[in-house]
Structure formats: structure tokens, C-alpha cells
Image (spheres, rainbow, N blue to C red):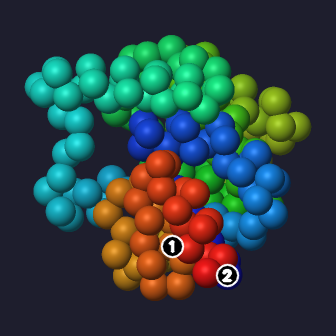
Amino acid sequence: MKITAYLSIGSTYTFLTALRLRDVIDREGITVEFRPFSVRAIMREMNNIPFPPEKEAKVRYMWRDIERRAAGYGLPSPKVPAPYPLQDFDRANHVGIIAEQQGWYIDYFEATYRAWFLDGLEAGSDANIHQVCQGLGRSFDDVTAAALTPEAEAGYRANTEAAKAAGVFGAPSFVVGDELFWGDDRLEDAIAFSRR
């Protein structure tokens, strides 16, 4: 059974998924449909701010937890705190829509998180997108122009509506049939469920 991954660049814990998803797909031989969406829009509707700046202890915990989990997976150690929240959240995900439509989403997904969490280049910024496009052999001008089109916005909205319809309230989320699995630490659970 197919797994639909609702992924939103801007989610901090999604760093863990971004750097390991390709290996998991290859190792497990699974089929994943990528659906870039706006977790921010959904969270605003729910009046949910996961890590507000005024809650310093919670924010410190988040960064340390990401460091620990990255080490546990054998991933590169992130440079935390990374720039957060993103200033160009929607732009980062509009580029994701273009990458998904053109068949290179997983490359973009991983590269933009690497640039953000390892190099300190905020996702959605010119610096991040320039570095990612250069590394992937893509034209910055073409990609950023395509990300501004009504078609990119329509795809983004459609994915966000599909996420809402599936009950998604956070990212990353993985949907198998009617079952929702939220969080990087539920990826393997989603895979196991898809094989039942």
C-alpha cells in the first residue's frame, strides 16, 4: 500500500525525516507520494503555535531533542538553533511544489534542510535556494519564477486541503489508507502498517 508523505518545509523535526527518508525508501523498497503543504496554515486554523519564542525552556528542549535524535540516527549534527521560524515559509514550499511536479522533490527536500540546518541558510531564502539549485544543477531563475506562478499556489493549496481532509495537524505526517501517522518517529510505524 502506498504511503503519502505530507511534508512542510519549516517544521524543525522534519530535518530528521529530510536527511533519512531517501535511505528508508531505498532500504524498505516502499513507494512514497510526496505532498508539500502548509502546516502553518493548518496550525493557524487550530490556533496552535508549537514553539513560541517566549517559551524558552520548550524551545531549548526542541533543539536539544533534535540534536539527540540526529545522533541516534547517525545523521550529521545540526547547527542549532537554526534560523526559526522561517521568514519565507511559503516560498520554500512553493519551490517544493515545483520540485514535486518536476520529479525532484526528494532531492530538494533533503538539500534545503541540509542548507538550513547544517549551513545556517534559512529555507526559502535566496541564499538557500541558490545553493540548492546550484548543487542540483537547476536554474535558480527558472525555479523561483515557476514558484511564483498561480499553478504553484494552486498545487500548494490543493495539497493543504488534502492534508486537512486526511486529518493532518502537523508535519511530517504519513498517511496509509485512512490511517494517519504524525512525526518523524512514526515513519517506521507507517511502513509497518502499510505491509499488513
Circle 2 Cα neighbour tier, 10 Å, few/some/many (<14 / 14–19 / ≥20): few
Res 127 quadrant in image:
top right
Does 32 sit left or right of 122 as displayed? right
Q: Position of residue 73 (x, y in %)?
A: 60, 32
Q: Position of residue 176 (x, y in %)?
A: 54, 77
The residue to which callout 1 is attached is 175
Residue sitting farthest toward the front: 196
Q: Is residue 15 above or below residue 120?
A: below
**Res. 106 visible in picture:** no
Circle 1 Cα neighbour tier, 10 Å, few/some/many (<14 / 14–19 / ≥20): many
Mark 2 or 1: in front is 2
Residue at image coords 53%, 37%: 15
Q: Position of residue 75 (x, y in %)?
A: 64, 27
Residue at image coords 32%, 63%: 169
Mark number displayed over residue 1: 2
Q: Is residue 131 above or below residue 80?
A: below
Residue at image coords 46%, 85%: 178
**Res. 131 visible in picture:** yes
SS of the residue under disc 1: strand
Contact (Cβ within 8 Å) of mark 2 with mark 1: no
Residue sitting farthest toward the right: 137
SS of the residue under disc 2: loop
Amino acid type of disc 1? Answer: Val
Mark number displayed over residue 7: none
Does 79 sit left or right of 195 as displayed? left
The answer to which of marks 2 and 1 sits earlier in the sequence is 2
Residue sitting farthest toward the bottom: 178
Amino acid type of disc 2? Answer: Met
Q: Is residue 168 above or below residue 73?
A: below
**Closer to us: 30 or 32:** 30
